Image: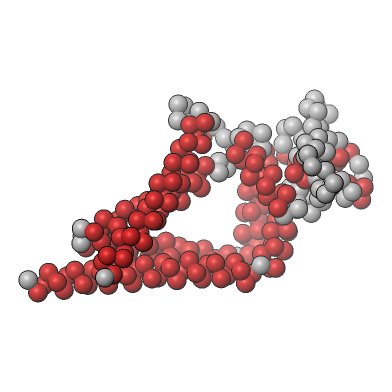
Amino acid sequence: MTILISPLSISVLQFLGVAFLGIGLWAWSEKGVLSNISSITDLGGFDPVWLFLVVGGVMFILGFAGCIGALRENTFLLKFFSVFLGVIFFLELTAGVLAFVFKDWIRDQLNFFINKNIRAYRDDIDLQNLIDFTQEYWECCGAHNADDWNLNIYFNCTDGNTSRERCGVPFSCCTKDPTEDVINTQCGYDVRLKEVLEQQNYIYTKGCVGQFEKWLQENLTVVAGIFIGIALLQIFGICLSQNLVSDIEAVRASW
């Protein structure tokens, strides 16, 4: 019975992996990356498409090994599925422990990551949308504060900057007016020329690193529950594959 159930459940994982890979490749095709592979290294910040490709690739490999291994009663593929899933579980566990022990280092790395992507804000539409979503969702601006946008060539306050966005911030930093149905994409223009206290009337002045930490503390139970649920599914997958391997080897030994 478990041999019949396993391929059906794991094939869903394989289908999701193909879907993620398809979305990632389609996004790269729209941006012209597939016609010019060297452009992958041109982006100074993080390309969100990598998330779809990596997650999709891992899910496809796991789904393929688990599904084909169970259908064909291939113990090598089932053992590969079990070991691969175990490695992922170990890496997740290690990352969780390190994140708890080295909280200050993680905070510094997060700050560095955000600032690096602020520099590349206008270089890629997917990265731009990701930053805008982050700032709107956590009601923040920059890594530590709005002045982090000085790192971007379009928003910095240097005298040589001729951009209309000089001394401004992206619209995602602006506080939202519930009466406005249309987003004012120019709401952040010249806002950093104002005094800090006055800026609070127009934009979010708290940094995204601090807001993320605050959100994490407020939703710690939910986040922990999600990670525990994922861990239990991984453990269940490992146990199921090992059980299938034992059943297959027992049947073969009885011949």
**In screen coordinates, is 101 left or right of 8?**
right
- Which residue extends farthest left? 255
Identify the residue at image location x=31%, y=53%: 64
Count of labels in the image = 0
Locate residue 3, reporting x and y percent. 26, 66
- The relative height of residue 112 versus residue 220 in the rendered view (above or below) is above
- The relative height of residue 129 versus residue 13 in the rendered view (above or below) is above
**In screen coordinates, is 39 left or right of 167?**
left
Question: Looking at the rendering, in which quadrant would you find the N terminus?
Answer: bottom left
- The relative height of residue 238 versus residue 166 in the rendered view (above or below) is below
Locate residue 65, reporting x and y percent. 30, 56
Locate residue 72, reporting x and y percent. 20, 58
**In screen coordinates, is 245 left or right of 252?**
right
User: In this orientation, does residue 58 appear?
Assistant: no
Quarter location, residue 82: bottom left
Question: Looking at the rendering, in which quadrant would you find the C terminus?
Answer: bottom left
Front residue of this view, candidates 74 and 91: 74
Identify the residue at image location x=52%, y=31%: 30
Identify the residue at image location x=92%, y=47%: 198
Locate residue 13, reporting x and y percent. 39, 56
Identify the residue at image location x=73%, y=49%: 136
User: In this orientation, does residue 192 appear?
Assistant: yes
Front residue of this view, candidates 185 and 96: 185
